[in-house]
Image (cartoon, rainbow, N blue to C red):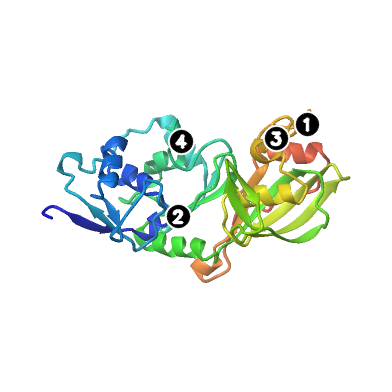
Amino acid sequence: MPGVTFVKVKSEDDGIRLNRWFLKEYPSLSLGRLQKLLRTKQIKVDGKKAEANLRLSAGQEIRLPPLDNEKAVKNEKILSKTDVDFIRSLVLFKDENIIVLNKPSGIAVQGGTNTTRHIDGMSDALMYDLNERPKLVHRIDKDTSGILVLARNRHYAEILTKAFREHELRKTYLALCVGLPPKTSGEIKAPLEKIGEKMQVVADGQKAVTEFKVLDAAGEKFCLIAAEPLTGRTHQIRAHLEYAGCPILGDDKYFGAKRCRPQGLSAKLHLHAYQIDLSSVYHKKFVVNAPLPDYFKDDVKFLGLNFKEHRGQ
């Protein structure tokens, strides 16, 4: 058919939903128009009919009909000085290939319904001396704070995307929990499946493994846990710690809004992406740590828990 084109999914778009891919590449294409093109099979993925929520994989081929009236017009959004200063204040490390941010709790990594201010939307301010916009290579939850890595060029976007997908980069999270797990260290092996709005442990779910260690405890009421996800399921640490009997403080989704706010402690989610080991990417020992947010640090101190932060990289 004249005008039909075929586009390969790039490494940095691995795992993105088809509708989000169009939102990024063709922001002027309306949702209604996209749905019609999908319904009439004018858009296909690897030659097959596709749904808007299909998760794409790197290397897949998207068939595009003529879209002359909906050219990919990038939003020329001019960032405010406030947003520029904000996003640059989050930088923990920067070189010619990557940027590591310390993302605050409460700000989304990407846009979505009713989400207009997000990290991706402010990343133009992180171009600095380069002409290329930094690319997201992984994501963390909106309410989770801590380390977020961006690639500054296509080559490193491919390297990092592959490393995250194949779990080559060790990531350590800190979680302030209510209660105490049965053991002070070990692995939580509990398959997960999304049921409703939550990930839940089910016998035939997707394999999910989290390594954990209790760093300190306040009796059996609270504890500080270092957790390392060995698989990459959605909300894995949150669901696994709830399953282990020590849900994360401030986790409305996995703990319940009425139970997660003991008096005197912050209502925010106390889950922080604290450390990432980038040694496999740099071919030398290279670890980056993200300082705890003030509310997390204050609550650890309030509960009398011992934790010594390691600064920098």
User: Which of the two marks, 1 or 4, is nearer to us in this view?
Assistant: 1
Q: Residue furthest left?
A: 2
Mark 1 element type: loop
Alpha-carbon span between mark 3 and mark 1: 12 Å
**Residue 137 tag number:** 2
**Residue 85 tag number:** 4
- Label 2 is placed on what type of residue? Val
Q: Observer-nearest residue: 146 or 183? A: 183
- Residue positioned 57% across, 48% down in the render: 194
Residue receiving disc 3 = 256
Q: Which x, y percent locates residue 42?
A: 23, 49
- Label 4 is placed on what type of residue? Asp
Q: Is residue 291 visible?
A: no
Alpha-carbon span between mark 2 and mark 3: 31 Å
Alpha-carbon span between mark 2 and mark 4: 22 Å
Q: Which x, y percent locates residue 195?
A: 59, 45
Q: Quadrant of the N terminus?
A: bottom left
